[in-house]
Amino acid sequence: MIKYFLLFFGALLLNSLSSLGQQVRPPAAQPDTASLYVIAPDDPISAMLDSLATLKIFQNIEMRHGGQENQREFPADFVPVFSDSIKAARIRKMDDRSPIEFTYNAAVRAFIDLYANRRRAQTERMLGLAQLYFPLFEEQLDRHSLPLELKYLAVVESALNPTARSRVGATGIWQFMYHTGRMYGLRVTSYVDDRKDVIRATIAAAEYLRDLHRIYNDWSLALAAYNAGPGNVNRAIRRAGGVRDFWKISPFLPRETRNYVPAFMAVAYVMEHAREHNLFAVPPIYSFLDVDTFQVRQQLSLRTVSDKLDIPLDNLRHLNPAFRLNIIPRNQQNPYVLHLPREFSSLFMANEELIYNFRSPEDIRQAELAARMEETTVHVVRSGDVLGSIARRYGTSVGEIQRLNNLRGTVIRPGQRLIVRAPANRPVTAATRPNVHVVRSGETLGAIAGRYQISVANLMSWNNLENSMIQVGQQLIVRPPANQPGTN
């Protein structure tokens, strides 16, 4: 009788737990593997996987994927199925060798199913991207004395897509919001978004995770705070009665964060047991060992590098995703780097000066336009001004002001902006080129040579320069001296 009573009571308890669904998370010590847990169709973690479809770095997948047949224990389209007890045992082993607490329950199982079964193609792409990014992640995590398993967090965040952007504006491989990124030194300008710079963002993520763990002294809570912010986690702890356990405060967290920690555990499990699940990496065109890094000492165009070295621009943009206009700007304090396929390293070094100094006709036109804009003088009309007094003030004529501003009469009004002096709208040629150029902030010999359509070698020769160092305010001869009538 006691035996049947225990069986009946156990069945009732199991049904009770199942009816609670995803709103209840038991403590990690007693994981629930029986409950049904459903991932919503609009879940951002799931949706982030779709961004991998746009990455051109995965061209010719079939050709590169075909060489794995001899590694497989099963046919390519076979999906192995494992019991809860086997998956739980594997996760217990992961828990034994990591300071991060890994557990197996219905939520973790649902995300294992997502990555290992329902989105297998995307998971194999992420396994390939891991060959490019994980060595870099591990280096920075080790440098900051953090668990190496935190590298899997970037998979949950961005599916390892460095250009990923969430619906709320989080950007890059570690999905930094604008203000959080600024707190950790990630700048966003017209030229650069450091959140997409894999190296800088990884350093910032390591520092942020370290700070969060110091607050909570618990990795699951630190991960939740990385996703939702410390404010949401602290509020959930208060609403749960002060308990500092992710699974117990989970019902009080935003839905995305409730999924976040289980997804992290599932990703770690699937990527560490990929072979058992018949999952094999679809590698991108380049791996970590295929890429060299060069410090950029002056402004550099990715398009020029692409043209001169015959590298597809899309490949360069994937390796250098932070540069919004395909321009790597000069940064003296914290220089940017160019990531280049190793096979092109020698060619780049042999042609470095040519690449730095090359200016396309469009580059030259833009430089001339900028110079003309800087030389333009504008007057804001004040009460009592007339065209005659304005012309006398600037040493010009009423007719010239009318011509520059397309004025038919002499009526003007306060607040109106009038161009009173502008350079002639003619291209710089040998006949019109000035003799001397005054160096301005940020200019290089290459840029000056490009503007005046001369070579750097001539510029150095005419000015007796021993190297390329120039100073703001320095006057440079930009036309051939009398004894040197030609240019090289």
Image (cartoon, rainbow, N blue to C red):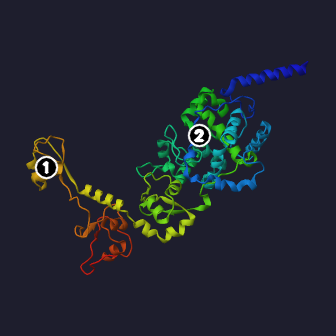
How far is disc 2 from disc 1 in space, using C-alphas? 67 Å
Q: Which mark is residue 215?
A: 2
Is residue 99 visible in the rendered structure shown here?
no
Q: Nearer the viewer, residue 192 or 38?
A: 38
Q: Residue at x 49, y 57 (%)?
A: 313
Q: Residue 463 or 164: which is nearer the viewer?
A: 164
Q: Is residue 413 left or right of residue 351?
A: left
Residue 70, position as x, y percentages in the image: 75, 56
User: Which residue is pictured at 80% across the width and 37% down the height?
Assistant: 85
Residue sitting nearer the eye, 86 or 97: 86
**Label ID, residue 402:** 1
x, y percent for residue 93? 77, 44
Quarter of the figure with the C terminus: bottom left
Quarter assignment of residue 230:
top right
Observer-nearest residue: 191 or 140? 191
Residue under the image location 81 percent in, 22 percent down = 11
Residue 227 image point, x, y percent: 57, 38
Is residue 369 depicted above or below 455 in this figure? Answer: above
Give the amino acid at mark 2.
Ile
